[in-house]
Amino acid sequence: MANILIGVSGGIACYKIPTLCRLFKKEGHDVKVILTENASKFVTPLTFESVTGNRAYTGEFDPGLDPEIIEHIDLAGWADKFVIAPATANLTAKAACGIADNLLTSTLLVYTKPVIFVPAMNTNMFNHPATQENLKTLEKRGHIIIEPDSGELACGTSGKGRMKEPEELFRLIEGERPLAGLRVLVTAGATVEPIDPVRYISNYSSGKMGLAVASKARELGAEVKVIAGSISADCSEFDTVYVKSAEDMLNAVREHVGSCDILIKAAAVADYAPVEAAVQKIKKNDGELVIRLKKNPDILKEIAPLKKHSQVFCGFAAESENLNKNAIRKLNEKKLDMIVANDISRKDIGFGSDDNEAEIFFADGSSEHFSKGSKKLLAEMILIRAAGLLK
Ligand code: CTP
């Protein structure tokens, strides 16, 4: 059983932490809590002492402590896992800068393993570039961020920033990193086929689904590489290869597919491209303009012969009619292990939306329905199923 150290900083989500402590205790772990001064105004140290059976640590220089023990060194050495929940904007900023002005932040500097940060705050604070950069800094240093959910917030507003419920946090922290040691290659966004130096053919794909897969794969412990076409979201936090056309994407996939365990092909690839991109800008005239198109390579079909038995390939099917029939045909023609089909005629899901609803078809003829929910939740289902298919 593990020694779990929970650092609690001062936000309303503090009230969820005693329940989290109890869940760890029930599992047989030893739990210690460090509270910042503000955190102890939300929930008293006594509450934490009652649920953990250990002293709740508040200050580095409290009188009456064992002078033999240097608390921040001792606690950092004791902890097998170090979780900061809730991680306020202030605590996150201090951690990113390496400020050590209280017991919790000092212990963070001593601790050498990855820390799990659970940010929870007002949406604007969470979205602020400073907070986002701080979180990225922590992530780049190898720490794990458990993203907040969207919903009603204590401040009366609604948006991203709400801490996950203790049961879900427990599940995520409890080493449920089922993709640890696996390499996931994700293609995301739309390909862009040039007509001339200023115009192109593309499609409405935002890349959100692909990035949801990338971010969930990393959360579940995988090593992630992204091949991104035109994408509206920022993917700088991932190891990303940027491409433009279907031809470029094919080359990039060919280069990297050999070193992945799971390929998730979420990109919306343009099926046709201009026969030749004009070197100069095409000038308008009074007549019609005819652009001749050639068929692009089907990336999944092209790479199917490269697939090893140990790999799992998953495609997507964007359908506006006959969803099941078309998806199953694509699954077979592209020699996939699974395909995620969604109805693009619906306005509330799919392109550009944060939500999706899908039917997942498997090569063994079975299928599974994903009821409308966030792309991140769908991503989790896809990845868990894909990992389950690995030989
Ligand atoms: N795909 C691909 N190469 C293409 C077109 C699509 O690899 N040239 C992949 C997509 O990334 C997706 C799957 O194939 O994983 C299905 O894409 P979709 O656009 O739904 O189907 P298409 O095969 O293009 O067929 P159609 O456009 O006729 O529906």
Image (cartoon, rainbow, N blue to C red):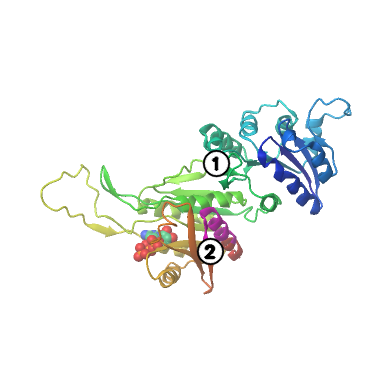
Q: Identify residue for label 1.
A: 157
Ligand 1 placement by image quarter = bottom left
Q: Is mark 2 in CB contact (under 8 Å) with mark 1?
A: no
Residue at x 75% of width, y 38% of height: 43
Q: How far apart are the two marked residues, 2 and 1, measured between alpha carbons? A: 29 Å
Other-residue count near label 1 (Cα within 10 Å), few / some / many at <14 / 14–19 / ≥20: few
Other-residue count near label 2 (Cα within 10 Å), few / some / many at <14 / 14–19 / ≥20: some
Magenta portion: prevailing SS class: helix
| Residue 97 % position (x, y) | 62, 28
159 left or right of 164 in image:
left
Provide the secondary structure element on which disc 2 rests.
strand
| Residue 368 % position (x, y) | 54, 68
| Residue 35 % position (x, y) | 75, 35
State yes or no: Cβ of the residue under disc 2 lies below 8 Å from any atom of ligand 1: no
Q: Identify residue for label 2.
A: 370
Of marks 2 and 1, which one's residue comes earlier in the chain?
1
Residue at x 57% of width, y 56% of height: 380
Residue 282 seen anywhere in this rendered image of the structure: yes
Region rendered in magenta: 371-384
Picture quarter containing residue 96?
A: top right
Question: Which marked residue is nearer to the observer: mark 2 or mark 1?
Answer: 1
